[in-house]
Amino acid sequence: MGWIGDTVDSVKSVQIRKALSQAVNLGVIVTLALIIWKGLVCITGSESPVVVVLSESMEPGFRRGDILFLHMSKDPIRAGEIVVFNIDGRDIPIVHRVIKVHERQDTGEINALTKGDNNDLDDRSGLLYAQGQLWLQQRHVMGRAVGILPYVGWVTIIMTEKPIFKYILVGALGLLVIFSDD
């Protein structure tokens, strides 16, 4: 019985070390992802350096599911630029083109009016802005679109709109971690 007991203890010890190793590897991956994200935030100057286009309002230039890379510079916003902005009271950022810029003479503050390329009305007339809001202020703008990765954002859209896919993916990754030999 001593030899069998030693073998069982040895197997348990290896399994514990393997589980700890997998937990450390997962922690390293999560930490690395956060470091990369924070690095992108610092480099781009945008609180969210990457966004997914969620609607058809900017077609044909940007399609639903495209990933946009953002940069936020100190330069004033100009008409024709594509910006990503948040509206007070809404959680989801919006991607639209600046169609008009208004500079306040007393403060020098620059405000912008936006419109989706595929929309008939500007965002003020289309009631996209918050009630009583006439212009976007600099504080609303998250960044300017500087790059695009077509279609890759569909993964995010599908997992958000059909949560079952998110659970299947997380479950499959969990099983992969549990049953992997390395």
Image: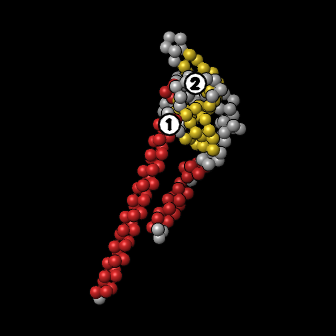
Residue sitting farthest toward the bottom: 1
Q: Distance between the residues labelled 2 and 1?
A: 19 Å
| Residue 12 picture location, percent across and down | 35, 75
Query: Would you say 146 lies left or right of 23 here?
Result: right
32 and 48: which is toward the camera: 32
| Residue at position x 71%, y 38% in the image | 60
Kindly identify the residue that appears in the image at 62 percent across and 31 percent down: 82
Which image quadrant: the N terminus? bottom left
In this view, the mark in front (2 or 1)? 1
Q: Residues within 10 Å of mark 1 (few under 14, many from 20)?
A: few
Q: Where is residue 77 in the image (x, y as percent from the top left)?
A: 58, 24
Rendered view: 10 above or below 73: below
Q: Is mark 1 on a helix, strand or loop?
A: helix
Disc number at residue 94? none
Name the residue type under label 1: Ile
**Mark found first going from the N terminus, 2 or 1:** 1
For the point 49% across and 27% down, the residue is 139
Residue where numbered disc 2 is placed: 77
Find residue 2 and report its horizontal and vertical position in percent. Answer: 28, 86
Please indicate whether residue 178 sits to the left or right of residue 97 in the image: left
Kindly state the secondary structure of the residue where label 2 is placed.
Answer: loop
| Quadrant in which residue 102 is drawn | top right
Identify the coloring.
secondary structure
In x, y percent, where is residue 41? 48, 38
Q: Can residue 161 be seen in this view?
A: no
Residue drawn 63% across and 23% down?
A: 79
Query: Which of 177/127 is in front?
Result: 177
Residue type beneath disc 2: Ile
The residue that label 1 is drawn on is 43
